[in-house]
Image (cartoon, grey):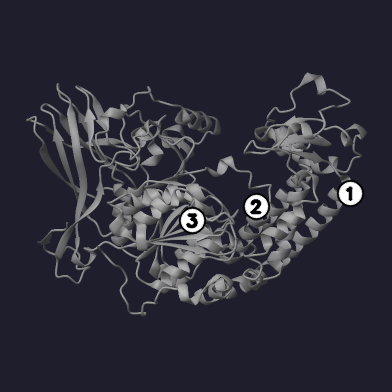
Amino acid sequence: MSTTTTTSATDGSTSTGGRTVTRLLQRQILPVDRDPDTFALYVDLEEARLDTSRHEVGGSKGAKDLNNAAIRQSTSTGRKLRPDQVLSRTAARALPGQMISFGTYFNGFPASYWRRYTVVDDVTLTLRVRGAGTVVTVYKSMAAGHNQVVDSTTVTADDVETFEFALTLTPFVDGGWYWYDVVAGDDGAVVESARWTAEVPEDRAQHGTADICITTMNRQDFCARLLGQIADDEELRPYLDTVQVVDQGNKPLVESSYFPAAQESLGERLRVIVQGNLGGSGGYARGQLESIRKGTATYALMMDDDVVCEPEGIIRAVTFGDLAKRPTIVGGHMFSIYSRSRLHSFGEIVQPWRFWWQTRLDGYSDWDFAARNLRSARWLHKRADVDFNGWFSCLIPRVVLEEVGLSLPLFIKWDDSEFGLRAKESGYPTVSFPGAAVWHVPWTDKNDGVDWQAYFHHRNRIIAALLHSPYERGGRMVRESFNHQVKHLASLQYSTAELRHRAMEDVLAGPHALHGELATKLPEVNAFRKQFVDAQLHADRDDLPPVRRKKPPKKGKSDIEIPGRWSTLIGAGLAPIRQLRPVRAMSRDYPEAELTAMDAAWFNLVKYDSAVVSMNDGSSVALYRRDPEEYRDLLKRTVAIHRRFHREWPALAQQYRDALGEITSPEAWEKTFAPWTDPADRPAETPADGPASTTE
């Protein structure tokens, strides 16, 4: 599909004497399943209504709060493409006089990312359109979000006409997109296809291939359907080396009714690996290990089992990786699987002083493209540089795995963010790339901050900070850990506080214990939690006593009002002291309140001696009870262990950093996988100087 041309070298950076080839960077696509909920991600019928610049708003907190609220407000009129206007995977029909913009998440061209991270300097947009009188306009945006017309043309005949636009990437240092709009003529129009291509050095002519590494546990049907999505896309197939599924559950993937069709379609490309439950990090590390030992794929793509995949996103990620200036991790974005036009996060960083992951400081999470389109959202036009990308969909060059090592043996949580930081320190950036995305259960719908996962959250965050914090004692890490511990205690979440305390004790045990406890830690955590009342979940609310209290709310005020700033500060100061008071007698037999998950914040929980609290997923409730003796004991231990961490942090950090290369090495992981490794099942290893990629 590539055509060879001869041009003069512009920078002398290639060894091909200036010879270049044409490579397809991106093509116009429409949703595979024609789901109207996703149309806003592909085509847009709304006008662009750019929000106010933060520089115009100024530094006033009140003004910034009002502007943020305005930015969140919908500008949509509800106009959508009709399903019958989606003619094929690449073609869309516009009704007479209708304007359709392709300045969308999947069809806009993220020029600033190509400008910053790849060898591409110029692109060519080729459009095939039919419909006399149809006007085609090409736009660009700058980092501040302002739109500019680049070029325009009119279709003069009813037959298909082809238009080419030569576009430079020079003005996209800080951000900006290219896109095209179509206004149909009197008889309508059909946009048959659009292709973004570039002349690239001849040694970049062939595309790489990926080993897709999926970790699954007891989600047979979801995982098998994902395999079907991957298998059924003919355009994707040449980019696949193998599809490796690490099955760690007790409900085998192969027993899914969807599995045989996927297996037949993928054939020898599919490999199912069965092993014990070593968590996400153990599953992904197994896929990484098999990929580097096999040595035939350019990349290993980490992917969750419970996602809906846009296959074109994988192709785009591979293409971007192929043309990157240096080996680059290419991550995808996460959309909500329940509300499919909502973007969970556009790019994540690890805040170094707090050492906590978050959306970049000038970005927004949970963004609904159906409510405010790409062209109307100023913040989406500035390039989002990140520290890591979640492993729900993340393409890692094999050479990066070979140099910086595999995943840390953390079971779950922080394995992906730690790896991104580790790679960054070795000179390998991560790009969360627009157009490479999956739909997934958003993190906000989970309760992983207080359930059994609290152990892994806390332990692994501390380990990552010990390894990568630029501050002598982890910045705010120890103080924030103490504050959170007191908050959980004051909120009657004793099981969570105990798990977090145990996590800190295990960190002190040193890095070499991580591999040995990978298969045993989760059962230990679950068994430990069962002794606490707040960790015992009830599917039926009637399993617990009704709410009764001796005194009604003071002056009839609601117990779930959100306090102001001063009330919050006063409450935070008084809450730890209140826990030392005697428990009201009636609260031992009857809960004093019933709180929904959304209202179960610490400033509400601290008011009660007992409460029924529902879980975030809505499936169960738990009974929280205040216990002054438990509180005193845990608070005493909390003070002691945090003092120890503050004192020993520098030495502990050095211990973990010295061991990092060893515990992430393929050799260390091979020992961990040994109980589930059959030498007869291993693929033949490729010599060290073997091929880096294969193409079909």
Residue 372 seen anywhere in this rendered image of the structure = yes
Relative placement, left or right, of 321 versus 203 is: right
Is the residue marked by circle 1 packed among few (<14), some (14-19), or many (20+) residues within 10 Å?
A: few
Q: Find residue 480 and report its horizontal and vertical position in percent.
A: 68, 52
As helix, strand or loop, the secondary structure at mark 2 comes to helix
| Point 60% across, 53% down: residue | 354
**Front residue of this view, candidates 385 and 454:** 454
As helix, strand or loop, the secondary structure at mark 1 comes to helix
Please name the residue that numbered disc 2 is placed on. 453
Look at label 3 and name its amino acid: Val
| Point 51% across, 65% down: residue | 285
Position of the C terminus, as image quadrant, is: bottom left
| Point 31% across, 46% down: residue | 110
| Point 43% across, 56% down: residue | 394
Q: Find residue 525 and report its horizontal and vertical position in percent.
A: 71, 57
Look at label 2 and name its amino acid: Gln
Considering only vertical position in the picture, is 70 above or below 628? above
Of the two numbered discs 2 and 1 on the same chain, state the one appearing first in sequence: 2
Please name the residue that numbered disc 1 is placed on. 629
Please name the residue that numbered disc 3 is placed on. 254
What is the distance, in whole Å, between disc 3 and disc 2 at their CAs?
28 Å
